[in-house]
Image (tube, coloured by chain):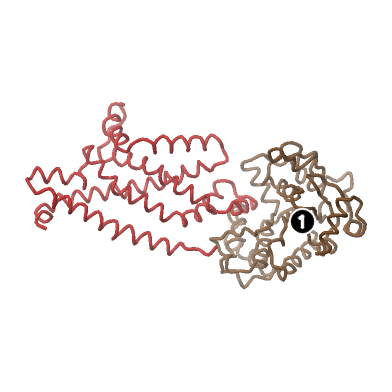
Amino acid sequence: MTNPAHAPALVELKAVNKHYGPLHVLQEINLQVAKGEVLVVIGPSGSGKSTLCRTINRLETIDNGSITIDGKELPKEGKQLANLRADVGMVFQSFNLFAHKTILENVTLGPIKVKGMSKSDADKLAMGLLERVGVGHQAAKLPAQLSGGQQQRVAIARALAMKPKVMLFDEPTSALDPEMINEVLDVMVELAKEGMTMVVVTHEMGFARKAADRVIFMADGQIVEEATPQEFFTNPQTPRAKDFLSKILTN
Amino acid sequence: MNVLIDNSDLFLTGFKNTGILFVISAFFALILGTIVAGMRVSPAPAMRAAGTFYVNFVRNTPLTLILAFFALGYPKLGLPNISFMTAAIIGLSLYTATYVSEAIRSGINTVSVGQSEAARAIGLPFMQTLSLIVLPQAFRSVVPPLFSVFIALLKNTTVAAGFSVFEAGSIRAYLSERGEPLLPGLLWVALIFVVLVLGILTPLQRYLEKKWRVAR
């Protein structure tokens, strides 16, 4: 599923660098994600994978290089940046549902405030999405009344309500109890099947094998390996990747 | 009791003006303080600098000096005339706003950064992120410090007595003109302040804390 040379990639990073003080967290990153592609980013903690994910909607700024989405350079700030973010869905490790708003309001807020949708249309859209991720009956509750798995599914619905071109998942199951991981992964696999373009930072190899078109392995701020899930998990090329896989496979 | 009943006109007008000073100043201080708190967390460095300068400058100036400026200095600037009451309201609002701003800013810091990241991620610009997501949650956690600020404001209004505003703080001077005993008069003023704080502000604080309690 690599991108044909003539079609512009949906997400493209060129020579992206970022430092946290003396730490070079992203080193000359070049990456393309084609429309409809599901990219899994894997790597040890501190490898820069979350930072990479967060630069794509500029929740993290970059020092230099360029990031384009659908051929357009990421705006630096202001209204244009807000507009672009509306096209890029984001799902966080810690869900980040708006704590003072109901589940339904969490999902309708973006469509109403950013897209100017009427409340009744937004409610309809949101209920449809909440049903789809299996939490429709919880619509009137506050986030804290839901389990982690349910909250994360609401967070996915909230992102989908903006009809994004691409969805970013930053370790979406890392904060979940084991028995809740699958309910979230199932929703993500479903999305992948429907052709959503996804960048997923995760250690869930089940998901990578089932839904990913490509896996990149990051270590120390660099993309060390890039392969299909099958190749990567069965036949990693670099010592770093072998070492990492041996550690997570034994768990 | 006689002091109070015999001079009820003084007490009524005095505390009525205290009430006016308090309510209007609290209103403007809340609005201005919220705006300044917003400026201090803004992504624009110029806004942050302006907010910080305002808070540091005004908060470190004694209230007496601020009121003196509006009562005595302002009329010399050749700007439209304002009454002593208006001058006191402006001074008290500007002064109290700095404390409101700091209370709200501490509340903003209690809202997890993930909340504003999620708001930005669905495309909300800074102002909406602040007004729809961050501030509503920040206000909940700053009810107690905010009420401390307002209780201080209620008592600070008596400073205006020194600048030709007839309010609760002026009652003593008028009583002594009428040859009334001072101590009972002062005790009545103090007692009414206690009643105002315990009878109105404290229950209001409790009500808001309860109403805005949120599961996290």
- Give the chain ID for the red colour: B
Horizontal side of residue B40 vs A234, given as left or right: left
Identify the residue at horizontal 23%, vertical 37% (top origin): B163
Give the residue type at disc 1: Val
In the rendered image, which residue does mark 1 sit on? A200
Placement of A96 over or under B53, stated as above or below: below
Give the quarter of the figure containing the N terminus of chain A: bottom right
Give the quarter of the figure containing the C terminus of chain A: bottom right
The single residue placed furthest to the left in the displayed view is B179
Picture quarter containing residue A61? top right
Give whichever of B2, A210 is nearer the camera: B2
> Residue A125 location in percent, x, y?
65, 63
Tell me the crowding category of disc 1: few under 14, some 14 to 19, or many 20 or more residues within 10 angstroms, Cα based: many
Horizontal side of residue B36 vs B165, given as left or right: right
Q: Secondary structure at mark 1?
A: strand
Horizontal side of residue B178 vs A178, given as left or right: left
> Residue B206 location in percent, x, y?
38, 62
Chain A: give its colour: brown
Placement of A223 over or under A38, stated as above or below: above
> Residue B113 location in percent, x, y?
59, 51
